[in-house]
Amino acid sequence: MAATLAALSALILSPVALGADGEGTAGRIDDVYITYFCFAVIAFFAVVVTVLSLIQGRLDAKKEQRRHDLDRFNS
């Protein structure tokens, strides 16, 4: 019950606390700001996917090398 009350009060009071004449905490927002923010989000996910793919490729290569070594030493 207390958690529900806290969540509801946070949802109801947050716009009042952070908004002043339609401005958020970041100040006045225009189209250029939103465009650059969205480009940054796209770039972030492209970099994350690339880095994680490179990491996975190296881990798979290590796994295959270990399998090859085990097969070579056990035979």
Image (tube, rainbow, N blue to C red):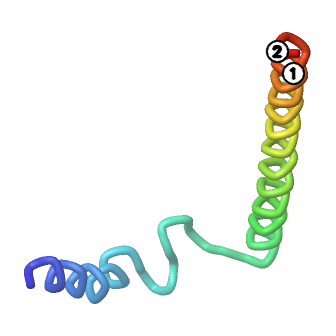
Quadrant containing the N terminus is: bottom left
Compared with 23, 67 (above or below) is: above
Quadrant containing the C terminus is: top right
- Residue on which disc 1 sits: 71
Front position in the image: 58 or 40? 58
Image point 85% across, 10% down: which residue? 73
Q: Residue 15, image x and y in percent?
A: 37, 83
Cα separation between marks 2 and 1: 5 Å
- Residue on which disc 2 sits: 74
Is the residue under label 1 in contact with that under label 2 (CB below 8 Å)? Answer: yes
Q: Residue 39, image x and y in percent?
A: 84, 64
Q: Residue 3, image x and y in percent?
A: 15, 77
Image point 55% across, 65% down: which residue? 26
Front position in the image: 57 or 35? 57
Residue type at numbered disc 1: Asp
Compared with 11, 56 (above or below) is: above
Secondary structure beneath label 2: helix
Q: Is residue 26 left or right of residue 72?
A: left
